[in-house]
Image: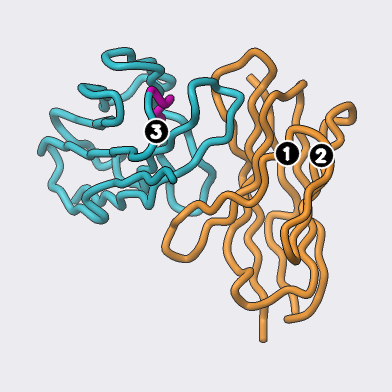
Amino acid sequence: SQTIHQWPATLVQPVGSPLSLECTVEGTSNPNLYWYRQAAGRGLQLLFYSVGIGQISSEVPQNLSASRPQDRQFILSSKKLLLSDSGFYLCAWSRGSFTYEQYFGPGTRLTVT
Amino acid sequence: GIQVEQSPPDLILQEGANSTLRCNFSDSVNNLQWFHQNPWGQLINLFYIPSGTKQNGRLSATTVATERYSLLYISSSQTTDSGVYFCAALKAAGNKLTFGGGTRVLVKP
């Protein structure tokens, strides 16, 4: 069976510091990978998606970037965090088509102070 | 892009009651999913249902694609059903799963 991991689970970072969130998927190959952000009490917003190693598409211009150095690894980064980057970040995967069901990781709760 | 609207935004139920959550979407879809977000934030997959009807225990869902809506039924609700229910839709030939605003459900004992 497939599993998806995210770490860290929670993170408190000062404004202007760098960020690196990691997501890995087990039990499948060549998945589509996604990063979402959820502001408090609201729905999810797609930030980035990737259909293969080194292939990243951005949905929302922002202070964040994503990379996919390995088939089942997806990383969300920032060089300098803003207060507005606070939120709940979720990674998801699906089989190699957008029409397939998406499955979500446990998420990382980021607070920028 | 596709618009996804959920109703009601909030729902308070007495344990044992039945309820219906609605999701309207503005375009043809290739993917329609229902999720339950628990108090720890985990998104749990309930149904993948771009069309038709499915049942899983006390939960069932129906999507009428031609009329652009989906319904989630909760029967004999339990306190563990509390949380936020999200509907998400993928426009046909699209690449972005768009989430509705969610329905916050509180089941009281």
Q: Residue at the location (25% across, 42% down)?
A: A83
Q: Are marks 1 and 3 in contact (CB under 8 Å)?
A: no
Q: Secondary structure at mark 1?
A: loop
Chain identifier, orange in the render = B
- The magenta span reads A30-35
Q: Amino acid at mark 3?
A: Thr
Colour setup of the view? by chain
Query: x and y percent of residue A23 in the render?
Result: 28, 39
Name the chain letter of the residue that bears numbered label 3: A
A19 relative to B39 in the view: left or right: left
Q: Amino acid at mark 2?
A: Thr
Gap in angstroms between the C-alphas marked 1 and 3: 22 Å
Residue contact at pointers 1 and 2, CB within 8 angstroms: yes
Residue situated in front as seen by the camera: A73 or A45:
A73
Mark nearest the camera among 2 and 3 is 3
Q: Colour of chain A?
A: cyan
CA distance separating discs 1 and 2: 6 Å
- At 68% from the left edge and 61% from the top edge, which residue is drawn? B10
Q: Secondary structure at mark 3?
A: loop
Q: Quadrant of residue A79?
A: top left
Q: Amino acid at mark 1?
A: Ile
Which residue matches tag 3? A28
- Give the residue displayed 63% in from the left and 37% down from the top: B88
Can you say whether A109 is above or below A47 in the image?
below
Using the image, name the chain to which the residue with label 1 belongs.
B
Give x and y (percent) for residue A4: 36, 44
Q: Is residue B97 left or right of residue B73?
A: left
Numbered label tally: 3
